[in-house]
Image: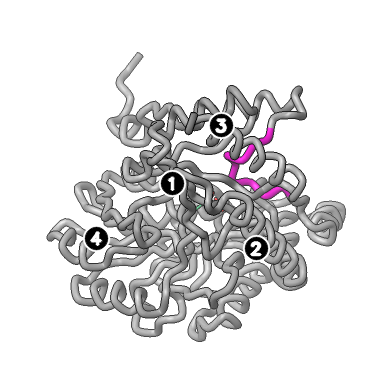
Amino acid sequence: MPNFSDRVHRIADEGSSAWDIHYAALAAVQTDPDVIVLSVGDPDFSTPSHIVNALSESAQAGDTHYTPILGIDELRDAVAQKLRSQGAVHIQRENIAIVAGAQNALFAAAQCTLELGDEVITFDPAYVTYEATVGAAGAKLIRVTGDAGNGFRPNIDALEKAITAKTRAIAFSNPNNPTGTAFTAGEFERINALAIKYDLWVWSDEVYADLVFEHQHQSISHFDQMNDRAICIGSLSKSHAMTGWRVGWIAGPAELIGHVENLSLCMLYGLPEFIQKAGAQAITHGELDVQQMRTTYCTRRDLLVSQLQGLSNVSLLIPQAGMFLLMDIRDTGLSSQDFVKGLYEQYKVSVLDGAAFSPALEGFVRLSFTNGETALIDACERIKIFISQLEK
Ligand SMILES: Cc1ncc(COP(=O)(O)O)c(C=O)c1O
């Protein structure tokens, strides 16, 4: 066989065992209803029926052919209008590319902005795919680790220290997966000032933007001075329970969108029109669904906190957004891997080893609240027993 490219190594997972229990639980829950999966990032809600109906009507009407590479006008306009209504006053259709989910948007951002040998700085813990996404473009991800004591908020002093001549971009998820931290306007101002000072791109992955609980979501697209360097990434995956539909977008300078169009032409060739029509329906008529899901996630977060706060030897990082809660289990004396394994093998509850995201999360586990309240209470009871047995 001829050689593979060097790229295949840069996109390969190093074989992290952090996912083993997660995959075991996903398989087991098919036949064992007693298994509770708290390790997944996929909403448990069904996609709202009016969105599914829009897909079906569109397909029936014959929208089954090639589409414009950047997306149909209806969906690009809906995304632009959504961002404008949230404060991104300058965003127009020409600033939007429709892509196959936020992950595809991250990939496109990397391919269109990075050179071989560049560095991209991220706030650590960072979402799991960033390393390979940056690596696929021939660049290197540099992690600037936050402090567990303040919920891993972005460490902006460390960010400036990490900037070198090779730095091309600052990339982060805001709100963050796995910490649930949402940036303040003040944090953004400081990051933006550095991006301007050192002439860097900023990729803000905002897939959890609609799931911020108590605060106002701060978006990179709200800061006018960033218009020529901000890449705002979003999708319907989390907000509308549409992970499988693969509808996402990049909002950025029109020139960047032109490059994304060229890239998409050779990578994606456009998304199916019936999916895009349903995506437009989701954005223009789905606000109530989003509100309900956000309220439910918030109630579930509070439930988990009320159940698990105050237990000896563990503490919680209470998320401001999203569908995950990090539990600091370092004082139990177990590694996060052993904790996850023990909890699953003895009590059939799967949580995710924080090490899947970052070495900084060794000793943390991530619980998803993508289950109803009854299952969450049941899971918490089992977690409490597991932890109390560790003390003995
Ligand atoms: C921070 C973050 N970015 C991107 C993604 C991928 O989202 P999408 O389904 O829109 O590709 C996820 C999915 O979990 C995520 O948590």
First reached walking from the N terminus: tag 4 or tag 3: 3
Q: Is residue 42 magenta?
A: yes
Q: Which residue is mark 2?
A: 298
Q: Which residue is located at x 36 percent, y 79 percent?
A: 186
Horizontal side of residue 110 vs 389, given as left or right: left
Label 3, label 2: how far apart the Cα atoms are: 24 Å
- Give the residue at mark 3: 22
Mark 1 secondary-structure assignment = strand
Q: Which of the two marks, 4 or 2, is nearer to us in this view? A: 2
Q: Main secondary structure of the magenta part?
A: loop
Q: Residues within 10 Å of mark 2 (few under 14, many from 20)?
A: many
Task: Identify which residue, 159 or 96, lies in the foreground.
Answer: 159
Foreground: disc 4 or disc 1: 1
Q: How many numbered markers are drawn?
A: 4
User: Looking at the image, do the residues carrying marks 4 and 3 touch, with CB atoms under 8 Å apart?
Assistant: no
User: From the viewer's perspective, is the residue at label 3 or at label 1 nearer?
Assistant: 1
> Most extreme residue toward the front, as rendered?
392
Where does label 4 land, which residue? 168
Ligand 1 is within 8 Å of the C-beta of the residue at disc 1: no
Q: Secondary structure at mark 4?
A: strand
Q: Residues within 10 Å of mark 4 (few under 14, many from 20)?
A: many
The amino acid at mark 1 is Asp
Report which quarter residue 338 is drawn in: top left
Give neighbour class at mark 3: few <14, some 14-19, many 20+ (Cα, 10 Å): many
- Where are the magenta residues, as a range? 36-44
Q: CA distance from mark 4 to mark 1?
A: 33 Å
* Residue appearing at x 56%, y 31% in the figure: 22
Q: Earlier in the sequence, mark 4 or mark 2?
A: 4
Which circle's residue, 3 or 2, is located before the other in the chain? Answer: 3
Nearer to us in this view, 207 or 319: 319
